[in-house]
Image (cartoon, coloured by chain):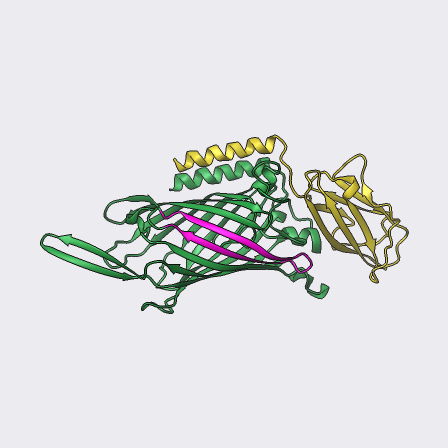
Amino acid sequence: MWHALAVVSSLSVFLLGLASPVFAHGLAGKRFFPSTIAIEDPFVSDELTLPNITHIKRRASGDEPAARETSFSGEYSKRITPNFGLSLEGTLVHVDPDHGEVLDGFENLEVGLKYQAFTSAAHEAIVSLGLSWEVGGTGRRAIGAESFDVVTPAILFGKGFGDLPDSLSALKPLALTGVVGLAIPTRAKTRTVKVEGDEVEVEVEKNPNVVTWGFAIEYSLPYLTSYVRDYGLPDFVRRLIPLVEIELQTPIDRGQGGRTTGTVNPGVIWAGKFFQVGVEAVVPINERTGKNVGIRGMLHFFLDDLFPNLIGRPLFGR
Amino acid sequence: MARRLSAGLVLSLLLAVATGAGAHAFLDRAEPRVGGKVHAPPARVSLWFTERLEPAYSRVKVVDDTGRQVDKADGAVDAADARVLRASLPPLAPGTYKVIWRVLSVDTHVTEGDFTFSVAR
C-alpha cells in the first residue's frame, strides 16, 4: 500500500515539475471550483480521477477483526451535452485484517448521471441534479459489495463568496460546495444462510434508506491572488486550495434511524493546468464510525483541457 | 496492476500535454498588482495570462469608483506577447480603480474577471 502511495506521490511531484502553474475545470464566473476529494462536486465536466486512494484502520466489529483497509478508485466522467454528463466509477479494495485472510476485490460498479441545472456567473453559484446507481452483484461479496442495487438521487450545489461586499474582501476566496442525496436500496433485507456442521443459521440484515450528505468549505489562494489581492506568494503556494470536507451518512429507517456515521476531512488541493492533486486526513466523527485517523489522496485530470478537440468535449452541443 | 494502469495513463496524459493541449486563460499577475496601492499614477495596466489570447476577442478596461471608463480605450493584446493584455491610462487622480477583463484563449475557452488597485494621495 505504502509503495503504491509512494508511486502516486512520485508521479504527482514529477507532474508538478512539468506542468505550468495554472488551473482549469469547473467554473462559475470568476470562481474555479476544484474537484473535491471526498464528496461529489457539482460540475458536469470531462474529467478523470485516477487514482483516489484511501487508507484507514478499521476497528474490530462483531466477528470481524480490526483491519487495515486500502481502496483504489477511479472515476471517468463524460459530458453528453454541455450540461449533462455520465460517469463510471470502480473501486478496488484491499483488506488486511489483524488475523485471518487478506482480501482483495472490487466494490460494485457505480454509474452516475448529472444535470447542471443552474449556473450564475455573477454569484459564482451552481446547482445540479444527480442520480447514481450502484450496480448490485458486480463487486465481490467478501469485501462487502451487496448483491442488490442502490439508487441515489441527489442535489448538488456550489457557491463562491466573491459577491460579498468589498469590506469583506478577505472572505471572497471562500466557497462552499455540497451534496444531499437519498440512497435507496432495492432490497429491504438481505438473508444470509450459514451452515456449520449440522447447524444452519439464517442471518437477516436490514438495508435502510440512507441520507448521504456532505459539504466542502474551501479557501482559494488562486482566487485571492487573481481577484482580491496579490501578496506575491510563491507560484506553488498561490495554486493551493485548503479545504475541509465533511462526509456523512444518516440511515432513516429499518431500525437504524439517526445512526449517523461520517468523517471530517481537512486537507489541501494543488490545482494545475491539466490536473490537480490533493491529500486529506480522514477523521471519524464518532465512535460508531471508528477511532483511527486515515489518509486520502487523489490525482485528477481535466480532460476538457487535455483533449479539447477529442474526448474533452461534449458528444453533442458545444 | 492498478499501479501499472495509473503509470500508463499518466504517461499518455503527459504525451498529450507535450503535444499542445489547451486550457483556460487565467490571470497570472498584473501591474499594478491585484489589490495593490501605487504612489505614482501608472501609465498603463498590464495583465499577464496563463495562455495565449485571441486578440479579436480579448478586452480590458479600467473604470473609476463611479463606473466611468478612465483608460484610453486602447486595451489590446500585446503584439509581441499574446499572453499579455494592456491598456493605456491618462494621469489618474488618487482613488480606487477597477480593471475589468474578458479574454478568449487560443483554444476557445472564455474567462473573465476584475480586480481593483488604488492610487495613493
Residue at 74% of width from left, 43% of height from top? B48
Residue at 44% of width from left, 39% of height from top? A6
Q: Is residue A99 left or right of residue B3?
A: left
Residue at 75% of width from left, 39% of height from top? B54
Q: Which residues are magenta?
A: A107-135
Toward which corner of the image does residue A309 lie, by quadrant?
top right
Q: Position of residue B93 (x, y in %)?
A: 88, 58
In magenta stretch: residue A56: no
Residue found at the very far front of the displayed protein = A316
Q: Is residue A275 left or right of residue A29?
A: left
Residue at 23% of width from left, 47% of height from top? A100
Q: Position of residue A171 (x, y in %)?
A: 64, 62
Between A191 and B20, the residue placed more toward the observer is A191
Residue found at the very far left of the displayed protein = A198
Give the chain ID for the green colour: A
Q: Position of residue A75 (x, y in %)?
A: 47, 45
Is residue A246 in view? no
Between A277 and B67, the residue placed more toward the observer is B67
Q: Chain B shown in which color?
A: yellow
| Quarter of the image with the N terminus of chain A in it | top left
Q: Is residue A299 left or right of residue B60?
A: left
Is residue A191 in view? yes
